[in-house]
Image: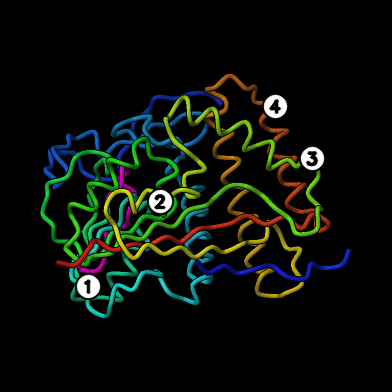
């Protein structure tokens, strides 16, 4: 396992049920099963927009604010990999790639441009991807936790910040295993949300820690998800039959406190991403769990203050895990 280490710090609304659509309505058939015209809809709640298909499965919004957060995250993750889109050794000529939980589709579009001979499929609950895309890229609205048609024909399956929002990773990853070609690769990128510091500058009441302490039981009990999944992801993949399991961990600064200019830039991006995430979660799941809006507004302000405090030298790990289906 590779790991990068941080070094020197710097010196001192109401609910709405309106459904709108970005896509034409109509029946569709996908490799994941039948879907109805509801796949083209959106639901507005608490001032944010959410998916209508399989409503309530995913607790983050799909609106412009979330697009901005995902765009920043895409930039940050590419920068972490030196401009690359993936860490797995997928070779120079993959012919069938699937992006599971593709979101706004930026990764799928760029991987399609990098490998123009490959067929790229992006799957998501929301129809929020652009219409003008490379000819080898296709977007499908469906639920990646459903049973797949077993084709055993994918060279590479990609997840990014998806698995910690799934209810049944065992089933989903088993479906990936069955649908990969022998020798095909899976890659999972996600956060392990425990803030740490090397110099004990994180206070006992650190606001981001308090936020995750609120969030974890809510999403576990209401959505069935495990935000700390990445700690055991290599073992899970091995138990499902994957081989050549590798993990690379990046420790990203929470804010612009690092002395190194590059880490400081990454920390600034990470701060904005985390602030948008905290605001999005405070907008729906925590309110639905019974917390008051004023309490959540105060939490968002506290997190913003903590991430802007350069005397707190906190970082959080992002895990890149990849593994291979055994070759024949």
Residue at image coords 25%, 47%: 174
- Residue 272 relative to residue 244: left or right: right
- Residue 121 relative to residue 226: left or right: left
**Residue 15, position as x, y percentages in the image:** 49, 23
Disc number placed over residue 228 in the picture, else none: none
Magenta-span inclusion, residue 152? no
Choose the circle earlier in sequence order: 3 or 1.
Answer: 1
Magenta-span inclusion, residue 131? yes
Choose the circle earlier in sequence order: 1 or 2.
Answer: 1
State yes or no: discs 4 and 1 in contact (Cβ < 8 Å): no
Disc 3 crowd, CA 10 A, few/some/many (<14, 14-19, 20+): few
Quadrant in which the C terminus is drawn:
bottom left
Mark 3, residue position: 204
Instruction: Using the image as rendered, state which of residue 321 and residue 205 is in the foreground.
Output: 321
Mark 4, residue position: 295
**Residue 138, position as x, y percentages in the image:** 21, 59
State yes or no: discs 4 and 2 in contact (Cβ < 8 Å): no
Residue at image coords 24%, 54%: 139
* Residue 149 in sight in this render: yes
Disc number placed over residue 235 in the picture, else none: 2
Give the magenta-colored segment's residue range. 123-136
Q: Main secondary structure of the magenta part?
A: loop
Instruction: Using the image as rendered, state which of residue 125 and residue 241 is in the foreground.
Output: 241
Choose the circle earlier in sequence order: 3 or 2.
Answer: 3
Of circles 4 and 2, the one toward us is 2
Disc number placed over residue 94 in the picture, else none: 1
Of circles 1 and 2, the one toward us is 2
Between the residue at mark 1 and the residue at mark 2, the CA separation in whole angstroms equals: 26 Å
**Residue 26, position as x, y percentages in the image:** 14, 39
Choose the circle earlier in sequence order: 4 or 2.
Answer: 2
State yes or no: discs 1 and 2 in contact (Cβ < 8 Å): no
Q: Is mark 3 on a helix, strand or loop?
A: loop
């Amino acid at each position: 396992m590779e790991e990068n280490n941080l070094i020197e710090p710097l010196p001192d609304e109401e609910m709405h049920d309106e459904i709108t659509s970005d896509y034409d309505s109509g029946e569709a058939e996908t490799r994941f099963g039948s879907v109805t015209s509801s796949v083209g809809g959106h639901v507005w709640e608490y001032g944010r927009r959410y998916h209508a298909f399989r409503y309530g499965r995913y607790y983050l919004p799909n609106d412009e604010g979330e697009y901005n957060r995902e765009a920043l995250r895409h930039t940050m993750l590419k920068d972490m990999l030196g401009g690359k889109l993936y860490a797995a050794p997928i070779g120079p000529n993959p012919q069938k790639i699937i992006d599971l939980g593709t979101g706004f589709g930026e990764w799928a579009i760029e991987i399609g441009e990098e490998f123009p001979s490959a067929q790229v499929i992006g799957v998501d609950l929301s129809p929020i991807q652009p219409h003008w895309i490379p000819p080898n890229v296709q977007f499908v609205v469906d639920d990646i936790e459903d049973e797949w048609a077993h084709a055993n024909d994918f060279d590479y399956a990609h997840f990014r910040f998806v698995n910690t929002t799934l209810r049944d990773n065992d089933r989903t990853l088993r479906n990936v295993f069955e649908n990969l070609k022998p020798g095909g690769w899976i890659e999972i990128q996600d956060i392990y949300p425990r803030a740490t510091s090397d110099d004990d500058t994180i206070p006992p009441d650190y606001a981001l820690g308090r936020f995750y302490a609120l969030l974890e039981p809510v999403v576990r009990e209401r959505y069935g998800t495990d935000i700390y999944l990445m700690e055991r992801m290599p073992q899970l993949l091995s138990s499902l039959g994957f081989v050549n399991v590798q993990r690379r961990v990046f420790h990203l600064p929470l804010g612009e406190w690092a002395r190194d200019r590059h880490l400081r830039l990454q920390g600034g991006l990470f701060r904005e991403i985390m602030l948008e995430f905290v605001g999005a979660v405070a907008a729906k799941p925590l309110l639905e769990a019974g917390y008051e809006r004023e309490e959540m507004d105060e939490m968002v302000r506290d997190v913003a203050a903590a991430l802007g405090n350069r005397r707190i030298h906190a970082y959080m790990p992002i895990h890149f895990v990849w593994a291979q289906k055994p070759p024949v």
